[in-house]
């Protein structure tokens, strides 16, 4: 049986599944129930400085995007950091860690971007015997207007400065949580590394308005007739998160920097994809809020079964395995040729492949052959784009088949070249022509 024990920057947990800093980790009651369900760790809902707690809205805090079957695809929230007293949180954290010494407990922190504020809170958190801290530089609403959250995460110099303060004033491992609301995720990651961070976590939520109430003409969620931008999360953000994780994992300047992957993780497969793209563990929020804490049971079983099936003994066998295969477009093999193929036995003759190809692509799929409704790929027109694969409602009905080297590509009339060639040397590339001259 696969060994799912996780060691992330020295923080040990029985599995790589942590709950992210959010409402599910706001109090001891929730965290204790999460640990009983099997979660390997939690990042406690973000703590603020001592004094009057922040004030959250007392009305709707979430907006949603649903699929056709009412399945939750994306969630927008306008909630802020914990509105519970700092010392209440600290007492509960200390007791939970005492009760569950084998689980990871991380304190998420957000205080003003002033050295004294960080210096003051770190000893208080240390006293709880938490395993580490996560610097919340990601929240895109509410706190950012106060110079915290993504207001810090969008300025690499601020990130490096605060990380240096934290490394100076605490013994605990420092995880820097990055905002996705930035053009190039590599720059804040490099800044965090320069400041001495032990790891980064990403992504935090994406700035968004998910919908508008067309009766009241206000964004959802609507509070007293008004709405605000909020943070978008859930399955819909996973592709963005995967890309950002991969960018950090393969960047020469941050290569090897431990990453805690966050963003739309709902199944064991989602988690596995983050792991193979360089994440050392994963954090989950929306899935737990949608389906409850016990969803981790399926995640653990699924990941373990997949690893057993593939012969992977430990997490180290899979972490970052896909990183070498992430490439810039310019290095993709332009001599690789593939064509779509339709399994006639599996085809239900819905015609979606034909419509998509005929109206929006390359007119490469028939709808009638010899007067009979039949969908076939015309190789002489097919560019191998695989749009038909993605619109077909029957799994594996349409597949992409590679043309072997030496065979004829009917579309171009050329023989498939066995040699690798990319855009950097292509004769149509003006830069390649200049280099040759």
Image (tube, helix red, strand yellow):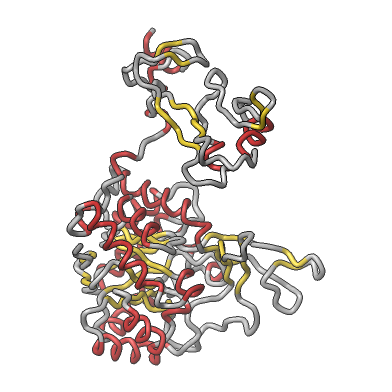
- Quadrant for the N terminus, please: bottom left
Residue at (31% x, 68% y) in the render: 300
In the rendering, at what x and y percent does residue 169 appear?
26, 73
Residue 304 in the image: above or below residue 104: above
- Horizontal arrangement in the rendering, residue 212 relative to residue 312 (left or right): right
How many numbered marks does the figure carry?
0
* Rendered image quadrant of residue 231: bottom right
Residue at (35% x, 40% y) in the render: 326
- Nearer the observer, 328 or 308: 308
Residue 86 in the image: above or below residue 322: below
Residue at (35% x, 49% y) in the render: 248
Residue at (54% x, 42% y) in the render: 390
Residue 421 in the image: above or below residue 85: above
In the rendering, at what x and y percent does residue 130 appear?
27, 80
Residue located farthest toward the top when viewing the structure as drawn: 437
In the rendering, at what x and y percent does residue 196 appear?
26, 60
* Rendered image quadrant of residue 373: top right
């Amino acid at each position: 049986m696969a060994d799912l024990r996780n060691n992330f920057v020295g923080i040990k947990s029985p599995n790589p599944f942590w709950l992210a800093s959010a409402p599910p980790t706001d109090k001891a009651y929730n965290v204790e129930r999460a640990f009983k369900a099997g979660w390997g760790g939690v990042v406690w809902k973000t703590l603020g400085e001592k004094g009057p707690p922040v004030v959250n809205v007392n009305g709707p805090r979430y907006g949603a995007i649903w699929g056709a079957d009412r399945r939750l695809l994306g969630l927008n929230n306008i909630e802020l950091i914990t509105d519970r007293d700092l010392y209440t949180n600290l007492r509960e954290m200390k007791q939970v860690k005492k009760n569950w010494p084998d689980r990871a407990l991380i304190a998420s922190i957000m205080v003003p971007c002033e050295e004294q504020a960080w210096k003051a809170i770190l000893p208080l958190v240390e006293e709880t015997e938490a395993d580490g801290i996560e610097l919340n530089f990601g929240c895109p609403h509410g706190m950012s207007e106060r110079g915290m959250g993504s207001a810090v995460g969008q300025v690499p110099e601020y990130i490096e400065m605060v990380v240096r303060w934290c490394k100076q004033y605490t013994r605990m491992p420092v995880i820097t949580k990055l905002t996705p609301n930035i053009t190039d995720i590599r720059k804040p990651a490099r800044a965090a590394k320069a400041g001495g961070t032990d790891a980064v976590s990403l992504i935090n939520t994406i700035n968004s308005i998910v919908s508008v109430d067309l009766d009241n003409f206000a964004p959802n969620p609507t509070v007293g007739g008004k709405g605000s931008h909020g943070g978008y999360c859930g399955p819909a953000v996973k592709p963005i998160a995967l890309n950002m994780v991969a960018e950090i994992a393969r960047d020469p300047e941050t290569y090897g920097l431990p990453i805690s992957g966050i963003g739309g993780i709902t199944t064991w497969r989602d988690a596995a994809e983050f792991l193979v793209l360089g994440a050392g563990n994963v954090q989950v929020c929306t899935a737990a809020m949608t389906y409850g804490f016990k969803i981790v049971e399926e995640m653990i079983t699924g990941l373990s079964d997949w690893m057993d099936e593939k012969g992977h003994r430990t997490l180290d066998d899979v972490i970052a395995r896909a990183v070498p295969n992430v490439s810039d477009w310019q290095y993709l093999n332009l001599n690789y040729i593939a064509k779509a193929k339709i399994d006639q036995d599996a085809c239900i003759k819905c015609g979606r492949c034909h419509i998509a190809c005929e109206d929006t692509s390359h007119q490469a799929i028939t709808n009638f052959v010899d007067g009979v409704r039949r969908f076939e790929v015309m190789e002489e027109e097919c560019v191998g784009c695989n749009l038909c694969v993605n619109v077909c409602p029957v799994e594996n009905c349409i597949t992409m088949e590679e043309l072997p080297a030496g065979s004829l590509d009917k579309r171009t009339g050329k023989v498939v070249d066995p040699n690798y060639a990319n855009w950097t040397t292509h004769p149509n590339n003006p830069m390649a022509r200049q280099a040759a001259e």
